[in-house]
Image (cartoon, rainbow, N blue to C red):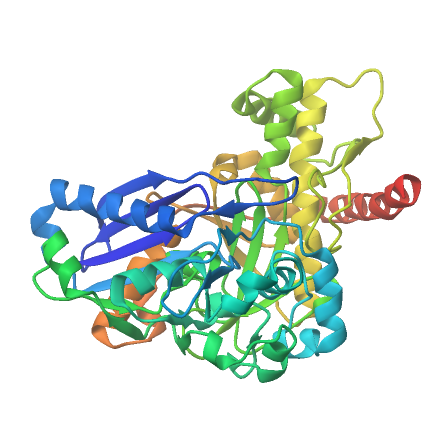
């Protein structure tokens, strides 16, 4: 048996998986986010640990025999969170999370001090860890002075599980302290925030062992032996392990609150000009690229809030309108920049909008425009991934929005790629973490352990509409700079 633990922003999820890859049981525990000031986002690391203990206590109560056979544990988690500890491993302040925006000024400072783009392969953004620590250095000097160790969320949990300060390559790549090509800490990038390697955890690959479970926890949860704890991965890399996107060129599209287009690569392929995230994968010798959009299904959530119609109704209305139009693009254009945008603009001040509204348009037309606008944003991500050398012919769709066949058809048309839909099951980060736990227990980093799930359907692009969708995307692309000029 193998266990995967995902430390998310809204909750912790633990998955118990058998040797064949079947999920035997799951348990979840909710987390809350503190927002002490506008744009701030924090959590108490003690809450992560309590939530992990809650889920494992419940798995012990419900499946004691199965839990006792766990040989490997994998960890996944929200990336970028700055968890600062003193010399006794005591937490010094609440962790500053990935969606905290306070460190914009610090990003510019770091880029002036070191070759962030060349070494880390990414733009300095407030979401990353290093700018957050620089903010603490400038605004909370007493906390910074006491800091002896900086950990990411899942690695703080690992410290509680094993007593070891360790991170994996994929999560560490999101700190802006990692030399992503060399898969090692960069002394130059660390110096930009006044730190050295002594403040960093030891690095391992996601499939490697990072230690074994503490003896008191082995007794608490009834394990027959002390399980190996794998290096694990950041949430998107772990999700890729769950759905089998681990070989160069394999890709997945996550259509959730935010959106991710993820492609595995055979080497380090940055494109900072396009705000592409170039990170290490959770498997040795593999990297990945990501395009990230901030408002995917959240765009439908917003439309639901202002119209009073539930999201399912809006999706159905948009899908019906799409079919009535014979699969042709809408006359309306929607920019989904409701919370700024990451890829390709890296513009937290970007704003959304509708263009081309006529008196005859109704709610269904707005719904279709939202579906298309989000799909256009994914096409923007694909374009900058291609600029960095990736070719994508197939993607696996996951997330709540992937239940919409019409939305996936629009995406297939815009991406020019076949979209595969998993038949059933949860192939998220916790499941991927369980697979990494299995790899560590077996002592194998082979990609054959991370097979794709069975697919229920494949959606091909419509070649007859390719030129229409290309032209529609060009109209969409013209709207952002025009709107930015008007609003600036």
Q: Nearer the viewer, residue 291 or 96?
A: 96
* For residue 276, side relative to residue 44 (left or right): right
Residue 153 in percent (x, y) is at 43, 57
* Quadrant of image for the N terminus: bottom left
- Quadrant of residue 113 within the rendered picture: bottom right
Q: Nearer the viewer, residue 261 or 69?
A: 69
Which residue corresponds to the image point at 36% horizontal and 52% vertical from the top-left?
6
Residue 30 in percent (x, y) is at 37, 38
Is residue 454 in sight in this rendering?
Answer: no
Is residue 361 in sight in this rendering?
Answer: yes
Q: Nearer the viewer, residue 436 or 371?
A: 436
Which residue corresponds to the image point at 59% horizontal and 29% vertical from the top-left?
301
- Quadrant of residue 57 within the rendered picture: top left
Relative to 444, does residue 274 appear above or below in the rendering? above
Which residue corresponds to the image point at 60% horizontal and 66% vertical from the top-left?
130
* For residue 168, side relative to residue 135 (left or right): left
Residue 232 in percent (x, y) is at 36, 65
Q: Residue furthest front?
A: 142
Q: Nearer the viewer, residue 7 or 281?
A: 7
């Amino acid at each position: 048996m193998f266990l995967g633990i995902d430390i998310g922003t809204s909750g912790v999820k633990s998955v118990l998986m058998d040797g064949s890859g079947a999920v035997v049981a799951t348990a979840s525990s909710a987390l809350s986010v503190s927002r002490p000031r506008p744009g701030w986002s924090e959590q108490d690391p003690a809450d992560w640990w309590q939530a992990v203990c809650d889920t494992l206590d419940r798995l012990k109560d419900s499946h004691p025999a199965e839990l006792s056979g766990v040989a490997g544990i994998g960890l996944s988690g929200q990336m970028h969170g700055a968890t600062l500890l003193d010399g006794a491993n005591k937490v010094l302040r609440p962790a500053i999370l990935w969606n905290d925006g306070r460190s914009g000024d610090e990003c510019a400072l770091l880029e002036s001090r070191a070759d962030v783009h060349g070494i880390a392969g990414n733009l300095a953004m407030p979401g990353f860890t290093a700018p957050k620590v620089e903010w603490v250095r400038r605004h909370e000097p007493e906390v910074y002075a006491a800091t002896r160790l900086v950990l990411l969320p899942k690695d703080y949990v690992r410290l509680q599980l094993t007593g070891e300060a360790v991170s994996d390559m994929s999560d560490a790549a999101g700190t802006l302290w990692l030399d992503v090509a060399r898969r090692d800490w960069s002394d130059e990038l660390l110096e930009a925030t006044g730190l050295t390697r002594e403040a960093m955890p030891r690095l391992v690959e996601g499939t490697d062992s990072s230690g074994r479970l503490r003896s008191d926890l082995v007794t608490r949860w009834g394990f027959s032996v002390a399980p190996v704890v794998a290096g694990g991965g950041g949430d998107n890399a772990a999700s890729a392990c769950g759905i089998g996107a681990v070989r160069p060129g394999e890709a997945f599209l996550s259509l959730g609150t935010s959106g991710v287009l993820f492609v595995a690569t055979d080497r380090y392929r940055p494109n900072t000009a396009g705000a592409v995230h170039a990170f290490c994968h959770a498997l040795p010798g593999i990297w990945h690229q990501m395009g990230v959009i901030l408002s995917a299904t959240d765009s439908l959530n917003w439309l639901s809030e202002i119209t009073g119609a539930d999201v399912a109704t809006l999706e159905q209305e948009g899908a019906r309108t799409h079919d009535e139009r014979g699969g042709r693009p809408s006359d309306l254009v929607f920019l989904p920049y409701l919370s700024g945008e990451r890829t390709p603009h890296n513009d937290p001040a970007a704003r959304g909008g509708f263009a081309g509204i006529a008196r005859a348009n109704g709610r269904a037309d707005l719904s279709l425009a939202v579906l298309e606008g989000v799909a256009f944003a994914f096409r923007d991500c694909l374009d900058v991934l291609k600029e960095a050398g990736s070719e994508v012919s197939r993607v696996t769709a996951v997330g709540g929005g992937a239940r919409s066949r019409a939305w996936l058809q629009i995406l297939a048309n815009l991406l020019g790629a076949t979209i595969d839909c998993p038949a059933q099951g949860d192939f998220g980060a916790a499941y991927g973490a369980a697979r990494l736990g299995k790899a560590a227990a077996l002592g194998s980093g082979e990609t054959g352990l991370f097979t794709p799930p069975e697919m229920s359907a494949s959606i091909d692009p419509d070649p007859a509409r390719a030129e229409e969708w290309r032209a529609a995307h060009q109209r969409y692309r013209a709207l952002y700079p025009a709107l930015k000029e008007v609003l600036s």
